[in-house]
Amino acid sequence: MNPAASNILQRLIGEGGFVSGQTLCAELGMSRSAVWKHVAALRSAGYAIEAVSGRGYRLERLTGAPVAGEVSPLLETASFGRTFIELESVDSTNIRALALAREGAVEGTVVVADSQTGGRGRMRRAWVSPPGVNLYCSIVLRPPLPSFRVPEIPLLAAAAIHEAASQEYPELKLFIKWPNDILAGGRKVCGILCEMESEPDCAHFVVVGFGLNVNLDPVPEELQGIATSLCIETGRKLSRARLLAAMLNRFERLYHEWLEREDLGFILPKLEAHAWLKGRELQIEQFSRVLVGTGAGLSPQGHLLLRCEDGSVIPVTSGEAHLRPVNQQQET
Ligand code: ATP
């Protein structure tokens, strides 16, 4: 959406009622015909805008698209989402945000795209990103902390997304799957990908990206049995803009609190209350080995605690966690 149309949208949302064409012209520094043109563009993007001569324009219906015009009025943040790059389509919001961060983008800069052509997860795996239904978002962070704390960020983001989605869908039980996923009904609704540029002692910047399946329905063929969406699980469509604003509001609060703390201890009870892997029989695939044991929770550093067969509990710093098939559980 172009910035002028976005400004008109925000002004109409803020007013809630009629705003005269003259007021829009004066406040936004544009001609009557420019206002008319941008209102027409908003209508063709799906916004219902009533026009009454002598009274002006009134917004009747939003689209829920994750655009600045809809998200900004809902933000309670100081920096998160205050610089908001919205794109129709992009290869990957993380790639774009990393490039912007290298050019000096401020902390809290958000890149959102309606679709991604090369969305990615860990290990360069593809993140399926169709248009018009989901959230694909990356946020630039500049934590003044040693880089060893960066691996805590995906769980911090997961907590923010979990809280935001749970507030919007109180009927839905969502689980956080260490280290970077959110599941509903045992299937993936959200993946988080954190990338950084750093020196050994300090992170120059971090980009935390997430893909959240919001109104996706049905699940694309290639994700059958793997993925689900908030809509499929609840039967309710939701405004992506509202969900994104709720996430950014929470994430900024959690992030600032986290900067003051030494680790994730302050949200550990929340993370553990919704942990998918806790108490389950697991197989953790790492580069050179496979670990087997029972999920025993999380450490304050965000490591998965694994209870091994000899009873010892070890912290697992990285890897892919899978539930062990029942027959394997019985054999060991
Ligand atoms: P795992 O899912 O095995 O725990 P992971 O969490 O590291 O691995 P990622 O690499 O972060 O997974 O995400 C990529 C994987 O997520 C893909 O291989 C695919 O299985 C799945 N995936 C891709 N697109 C979507 C999507 N839109 N919704 C849900 N899952 C998806």
Image (cartoon, grey):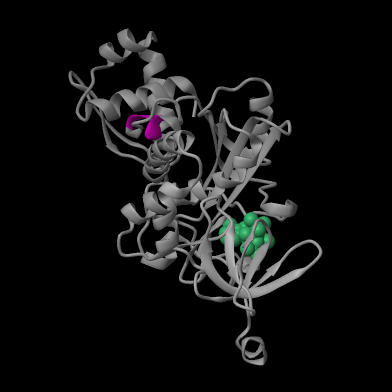
Q: Where residue 152 appears, x then y in whole percent?
A: 56, 46
Image point (59%, 45%), residue name: 115
**Residue 78 placement, left or right of 126:** left
Q: Where residue 179 appears, x then y in whole percent?
A: 58, 57
Image point (39%, 46%), residue name: 243
The dominant secondary structure in magenta is: helix
Q: Which quarter is ligand 1 in?
A: bottom right
> Which of the 4 image quarters holds residue 45?
top left
Kindly give the residue lying farthest to the right in the view shown: 288
Quarter of the image with the C terminus is bottom right
Q: Where residue 319 appears, x then y in whole percent?
A: 69, 61
Residue sitting nearer the eye, 133 or 304: 304
> Which of the 4 image quarters holds residue 82?
top left
Q: Where residue 102 appears, x then y in whole percent?
A: 69, 25
Q: Is residue 256 magenta?
A: no
Image point (27%, 11%), residue name: 22
Q: Which residues are magenta?
A: 69-73
Image point (50%, 74%), residue name: 279
